[in-house]
Amino acid sequence: MKKFMCSILLILVFASCSFGVKKGNVQKVDFDLTKFSSVMVYSGLYNILSNPSEYVGQVIKIKGYFDLFHDNETGKDYFGVVVMDSSACCSTGLDFVLRDEYKYPKDYPEVGETITVAGKFEMYRDGDEVFCHLVDADIL
């Protein structure tokens, strides 16, 4: 009986560790940038954005600062996660589109708040330019 209770307790502990998500579902992550130092996160994201075709379709998890860009011409909002290099002099970021219908600002963090995002990496064309973003993303 004691062995059975210990097994149940271990199952509950492991199960509870997997439920830390504020919004959305947990996804299988292919490339987790949250486990690296700031130098490696910045370098990793720079590499992804420099070689985007190598990452298309992969689920990427990244931690950084929430930011927003509003395009006055189209009226569209773009949401992103921004990372800084180790000296905090340079930054780069990645747009994300949440998997469900959310409204800004009600359903989003404050600009500058630290967030972790996971989503499927995709490239898209807008006019003559190619951009990258995470789609079907979750804020973890």
Image: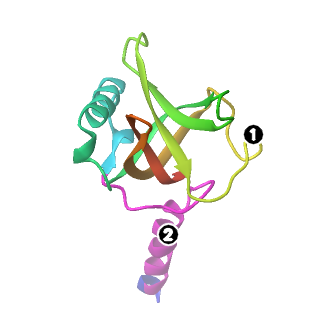
Q: Can residue 21 be seen in this view?
A: yes
The span from disc 2 to disc 1 (Cα, nearest Å) is: 32 Å
> Which residue is the extreme one toward the bottom?
1
**Among the 4 quarters of the image, the one containing residue 90:** top left
Q: In this view, does 46 lie above or below 61?
A: above
> Which residue is the extreme one toward the right?
106
Q: Is residue 73 above or below residue 16?
A: above
The residues colored magenta run 4-30
Give the image location of residue 100, x and y in percent: 62, 59
Is 81 in the magenta? no
Kind of residue at disc 2: Ala
Q: Can residue 140 be seen in this view?
A: no
- Secondary structure of residue under mark 2: helix
Number of the label disc, if any, that sits on residue 53 = none
Residue at x 63% of width, y 53% of height: 22
Residue at x 30% of width, y 28% of height: 46
Give the image location of residue 30, x and y in percent: 30, 54
Q: Report which residue position mark 2 lands on.
A: 15
Q: Is residue 95 above or below residue 20?
A: above
Give the image location of residue 67, x and y in percent: 59, 29
